[in-house]
Image (cartoon, rainbow, N blue to C red):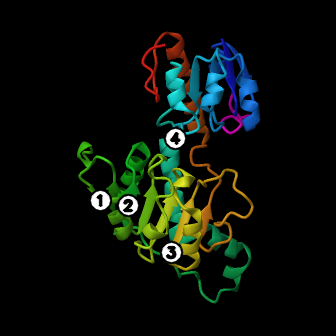
Amino acid sequence: MNIVILDGYSINPGDLNWSSIEAFGNLTVYDRSAPDEVLKRSAGAEIVLVNKSKISGDVINALPQLQYIGELATGFDNVDIQTAAKRNVPVCNVPGYSTASVAQLTWALILELTYNVNRRSNEVHNGAWTRSKDFCFGHEGLFELQGKTLALIGLGQIGSAVAKTGIAFGMKIIAAVRNPAKYNMPDISFKSVNECFEQADFVSLHCPLTDTNRQMVNKELIKQMKPSAYIINTARGALINEQDLASALIDKQIAGAAVDVLSAEPPPADHPLFKVPNCIITPHIAWATRQARERLLYESAENIKAFLNGGLRNVVNGVKKV
């Protein structure tokens, strides 16, 4: 069995090993693959594993030996799942591996917005505390989370984990979901997206990217927010119209934002959010703790094992049987 990993570096930059995948056949790992390298590198492989490399329908149809596509992530918008289904090629992802890690960074971003920890530390290192006439300084902008309203757009595993921490902080939790009736969460009030943006002190995005919600956070939706409110995005960058968000921050329509994802990654040097006030940007690291990456490799191997044994798990494109 020939197995190719097209973009392995982000998952394993050298601190893990590929032994769990190597056990299934002849493994070739590329750190990263340019779009024009995907087809050539996938040629002859029965199993292709990807994290962010795009597997188009044309690529799938040009690979007669392809039997299985493994998404080394939860999101799978980089693979043409419909074409794969027509070829009876299962596409299997890894749901839930990074839930704890992404929820953790979500709260790190929220807490940074409430206390500006890094800025205060830098001020101390630069001598501001030494020069202070008082035993403390920097009171401006500090506030408690207790009693504030947190709106969650999406309430899957990550959104639910974020909600539990918000409840522990004493926050009011509201959420926008497709089908509120399926949730048994008495501590959460379900609202429309517009109501969430109108009422929240913090709006945190935890929904998958689809054709219908691309750039859903735009100037019209932002205008409905409180001037004291914040946006947090650890989901997908393209959920936000980034120029509209930048303009809102410059005009102080909202208090701030914190994002771990952008619509283009890596982003261009002139990205509109780079020079705007009160916008924290981290380089898509929420998922990348060692523990999460270990789970990702383990579950990916379990997906392959099931496939090779005639079964399927975590299939996202409806293929029932190989």
- Structural distance between the alpha carbons of marks 1 and 4: 26 Å
Q: Nearer the viewer, mark 1 or mark 4?
A: 1
- Please tell me whether mark 3 sits on a helix, a strand or a loop: loop
Q: Residue under label 2, please give it.
A: 151
Q: Is residue 166 above or below residue 98?
A: below
Q: Which residues are magenta?
A: 8-17
Q: CA distance from mark 3 to mark 1?
A: 22 Å
Q: Secondary structure at mark 1?
A: loop
Sequence-wise, the earlier of marks 3 and 1 is: 1
Please give left or right for residue 192 compared with residue 281 in the image: left
Is residue 170 shown in magenta? Answer: no
Marks 4,3: beta carbons within 8 A:
no
Q: Quadrant of residue 244?
A: bottom right
**Sequence order check: which comes first, mark 2 or mark 3?**
2
The residue tagged 3 is 255
Amino acid tagged 2: Ala
Callout 4 amino acid: Ser
Percent of width and height locating residue 18: 68, 24
Q: What residue is at 61 percent from the left and 39 percent from the top?
A: 290
Pointer 1 residue? 191
Which amino acid, mark 1? Answer: Lys
Which three-letter amino acid code belongs to the residue tagged 3? Ala
Nearer-N-terminus badge (4/3)? 4
| Disc 4 secondary structure class | loop
Q: Which mark is residue 98?
A: 4
Q: Whole-percent x and y of residue 66?
A: 62, 18
**Element assignment for label 2:** strand
